[in-house]
Image (spheres, rainbow, N blue to C red):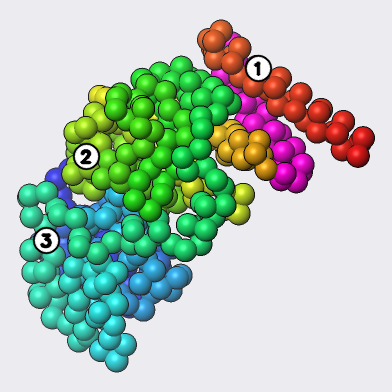
Amino acid sequence: MSNVCKILIADADRAMVLQLATLFRQRGWDVLSAGDAVLAQSIARKEFPNAIVLGNQLPGGGATALLERIRASVHTVVTPVIVIANARASKRKTFIAAGANEYFEKPIDPITVCDAIQKHLSPEMPTMPVTTTLDKTVTSPDRMATLAATDTLDSAPSKLLDSITRIATRLVGVPTALLSIVDKDRQFFKSQVGLPEPWASTRQTPLTHSFCQWAVSDKEELIVEDATKEHGLISNLAIRDLGIVSYAGIPVFSRNGVVLGSFWAIDFTPRVWKEADLANLRNLARMSEGGLILDKMLNTNAHDGFRRYASASVILNAAQILLRGGISLGAYESGALLEIIEQMAQALMDSQTSAASA
C-alpha cells in the first residue's frame, strides 16, 4: 500500500483547484478533485483521502451538508478538513461547528493552506474532532419519534428474530450476530446470538461500546476488516470490552425510511468480508425489518396490510438466500430458512382467511 498522502480538493473554482493541485504535487502529495458535493462524497468514501480541502460554494448539496456527511462517517470522521470561503459569504462559525479543522477566507495564500494541511498530516493517530454530526443524527426529533412508535426498546425477545440472527452465524460463519436498536444513549439488542456476558443478559450497551451508531448516523453499511486500525473506531470500548475486531453492519429501517439500528455480524479477529456474506446479511437485515413489524403487531391492532407486507418481505428475502446458496447451503441453514418461509406463508393464509370472513 502506498504511503503517499492523498488530498481531495472539492471546489467548483477550477482556477483555485489547479493552483492548489500544482502546489500539492510539488510537495509529493497525490491530488483528487471534485467539482460538486456528490462526487466529493463518493471519492471520500472510496479513496479515504488524508485531508480534504473544501470550497464553500459547492454545487450538489452545498459544502456544509457535505462536511456534515464527512463527519457522520466513521471512515472520514477524523479526516482533516480545510475550508476555503469567499469573504463576503463568511460562515466561519457554521463550518467550525460542522467539524472543519481550519477555515480560510479568499484571497488565500496557497502556501498557508499547504502548511495547514501539513500540520494535520501527523504520523500520530488523528484525534476525534470535538464536533461531529453523530449525536445530532442519532438523537434527531424525527428519529426519536419513529423509534418510540415502534415500541421496540426493552421489548421481549422474538422467536422469529432470534432464528434470523442464529441463521446469520451459520451462513456467514461468525461467532456473533445481533439486531441492535440505537437509542439516544445506548444500543438495545432486540436479538443476539453469541454475545458474551454480561452483555447477553443486559441486552444493551452504552454508545461508548457501539459501532452500530455509525450505521445509523451515516445511513450506510459499515464494513470493517480490522477495527484496531480504523482511526474512527480505535477508541471505541467495544474493542476492549466486547472483543470486536471485524464488523459488518447493515442498516435496519422503519417503514418510513428512518434508520432504527443495524443487523450485524462480528468476529474477534481481522476478517475480509466476502461479497456473498454481505449479500446474505443484507437479506437477513430485510427479514429483520419484517420481523420487527410482526413483533409489534403481537400486542397491537395494527392494520392487517402491515402483516401481509412484513410476511411477504420475510419470505422474499429468505427465498433469495436459498436461491443464491443453492446446494452449497448446509442442512441447518436450508431447514431454518424453509421453516421461516412456511411460518410466514401460513401467516399470510390466515390473514387472507380472516379478511375474507370479515
Residue at image point 13% right, 81% down: 109
Task: Estimate the spatial distance between the alpha carbons at disc 2 and disc 3, rounded to whole Å.
Answer: 25 Å
Tell me the amino acid under the disc marked 1: Leu
Q: Would residue 289 be found to the left or right of residue 141 on screen?
A: right
Q: In the structure shown, which secondary structural element does the residue marked by tag 2 occupy?
A: helix
Give the vertical position of 317 relative to 126 (above or below): above
Q: Quadrant of residue 9?
A: bottom left
Q: In the structure shown, which secondary structural element does the residue marked by tag 1 occupy?
A: helix
Which of the two discs, 2 and 1, labels the residue nearer the N terminus? 2
Task: Estimate the spatial distance between the alpha carbons at disc 2 and disc 1, rounded to whole Å.
Answer: 38 Å
Which is more foreground, mark 1 or mark 3? 1
Tell me the amino acid under the disc marked 2: Leu
Asked whether the residues under the numbered discs 1 and 3 touch, taking CB atoms below 8 Å apart as contact, a structural biologist would say no
Give the vertical position of 227 relative to 67 (above or below): above
Residue 17 seen in this snapshot: no
Q: Which residue is mark 2?
A: 237
Give the vertical position of 63 relative to 292 (above or below): below
Q: Which residue is mark 3?
A: 120
Q: Assess whether residue 306 is covered by the magenta stretch.
A: yes
Quadrant containing the C terminus is top right
Residue at image point 32% right, 30% down: 199
Q: In the structure shown, which secondary structural element does the residue marked by tag 3 occupy?
A: helix
Residue at image point 41% right, 49% down: 183
Q: Which residues are magenta?
A: 301-327
Res 338 label: 1
Which is more foreground, mark 2 or mark 1? 2
Q: Position of residue 160 (x, y in %)?
A: 58, 26
Q: Quadrant of residue 113?
A: bottom left
